[in-house]
Amino acid sequence: MVVDMSSSETTISQLHGEVFQEFSKGRCSELSKDEVLKCVENVFRELGFQIYDLCLVSLDGEPVRDLDFARYIRIEARHPQTGTTMHIFTLAVFKRKDRYNVIFLQSAVKP
């Protein structure tokens, strides 16, 4: 089966793959509480994304203010290569012995 992807779909796939790779490398692992959001923001900025919204989310899907109660980080961002397309990323946050780890869970786009 051959899948014909448009150039914009290819670009989006490549950009999301780059984000996935950064988190797969353990880029935001073994961090203190104060370092977590800075690390996540830096990954996206270094890849050329402009973050429009970053939200900590509980296991129940509710926004929370404290990282200790968050299980996910939800990010909405745009990238210059994809115009007005909004990229949505969900990252998981794990705490172990007062150190935090962030991993890539999923991504999507909103035209």
Image: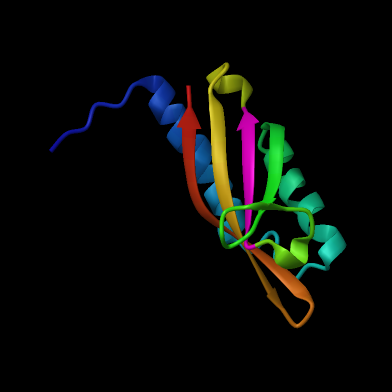
What is the x, y in percent for residue 5? 30, 26
From the viewer's side, name the closer residue of 57 and 44. Answer: 57
Question: Which residue occupies 68% across, 67% down?
Answer: 101
Question: Which residue occupies 53% across, 22% down?
Answer: 85
From the viewer's side, name the closer residue of 55 and 6. Answer: 55
Count of numbered circles in the view: 0
- 74 drawn magenta: yes
- 46 drawn magenta: no
Q: In the image as oriented, which residue stretches furthest toward the top? A: 83
- Magenta-colored segment: predominant secondary structure: strand
Task: Please identify the quadrant where the N terminus is shown.
Answer: top left
Q: In the image as oriented, which residue stretches furthest toward the bottom? A: 97
Question: Which residue occupies 62% across, 35% down?
Answer: 76
Q: In the image as oriented, which residue stretches furthest toward the right? A: 34
Q: Judge whether 55 appears above or below 15 on screen.
A: below
Side of 14 relative to 25 (left or right): left
Question: Which residue occupies 62% across, 52% down?
Answer: 62
What is the x, y in percent for residue 55? 69, 46
Instruction: Residue 53: name its quadrant.
Output: top right
Q: Judge whether 9 appears above or below 21 on screen.
A: above
Q: How is the image coloured?
A: rainbow
What is the x, y in percent for residue 43? 70, 46
Q: Judge whether 54 appears above or below 78 on screen.
A: below
What is the x, y in percent for residue 52? 70, 30
Which segment is the magenta one? Answer: 71-78
